[in-house]
Image (spheres, grey):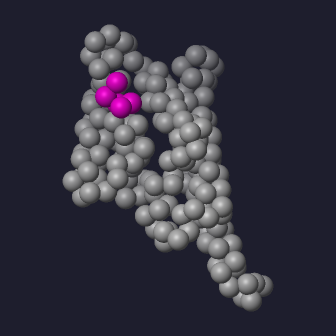
Amino acid sequence: MNILLSLSPFIAFFALMRLVHPLAGLLGAFAVSLLLSFRQWRRGESVKVLEIGSLALFGALVLYTLVAAPEWTVATVRLAVDAGLFAIALVSLLVGRPFTLQYARESVPKEFWSSPLFLSTNRQITAAWTAAFAVMAGADAAAQYVEAIPLWIDIAATIVAFAAAFWFTRWSSARARRRAGAVADPGSAS
């Protein structure tokens, strides 16, 4: 399963939050997270850090919403979700288990998993996603707490941050493959 599929609970959240209501977005995202985790478990695959984190995040936010009944605005509920996503990514870096490792291992032969290039590339990619999530949370906070900042700037910042992280992931992965190929066959270096 790739990282974009793992981000589908957040896509479901955004769509339902905007089209229906913030609680519908949270419930939909929780349901998608639960389905993804169950699917991986049923297939005998390891459940990814991002799926477990998403399940916990959306479960906690649904519970909080039902118990405390906060008056969510688009910006405040997005801030809670994006801050949670940032925390998941940051913790994975801080504990030395970048969340992208699990996805990379699905497409990289096992003999490379402990190589310094593989590990550093995943730290860099996870750091890029963590930075993107920080930008998204910061834009949400600005849209909520700075009256002069319209919501469209929050949305534009989110799109740019996400696109930049996605581009960096592809670029960094391709660069690592080229470097690994050059190491494997030093006579073919240009």
Relative height, residue 79 to residue 136 (above, below):
above
Give the extent of the magenta segment: 56-60
Q: Where is residue 86 in the image (x, y as percent from the top left)?
A: 53, 35
Q: Which residue is drawn at 26% across and 57% down?
A: 44
Q: Residue at x 42, y 44 (%)?
A: 49
Q: Residue at x 74, y 89 (%)?
A: 187
Relative height, residue 48 to residue 109 (above, below):
above
- Magenta span: predominant SS is helix
Residue 132 seen from this side: no
Q: Residue at x 62, y 45 (%)?
A: 127
- Given residues 42 and 78, the one toward you in this image is 42
Q: Where is residue 167 in the image (x, y as percent from the top left)?
A: 59, 57
Query: Residue 59 in magenta?
Result: yes
Specify the quadrant that holds the N terminus: bottom left
Q: Position of residue 99 (x, y in %)?
A: 50, 47
Query: Residue 117 in magenta?
Result: no
**Is residue 48 left or right of 145 when viewed as pictured?**
left
Relative height, residue 6 to residue 82 (above, below):
below
Q: Which residue lies furthest to the left in this view?
A: 42
Specify the quadrant that holds the C terminus: bottom right
- Given residues 137 and 109, the one toward you in this image is 109
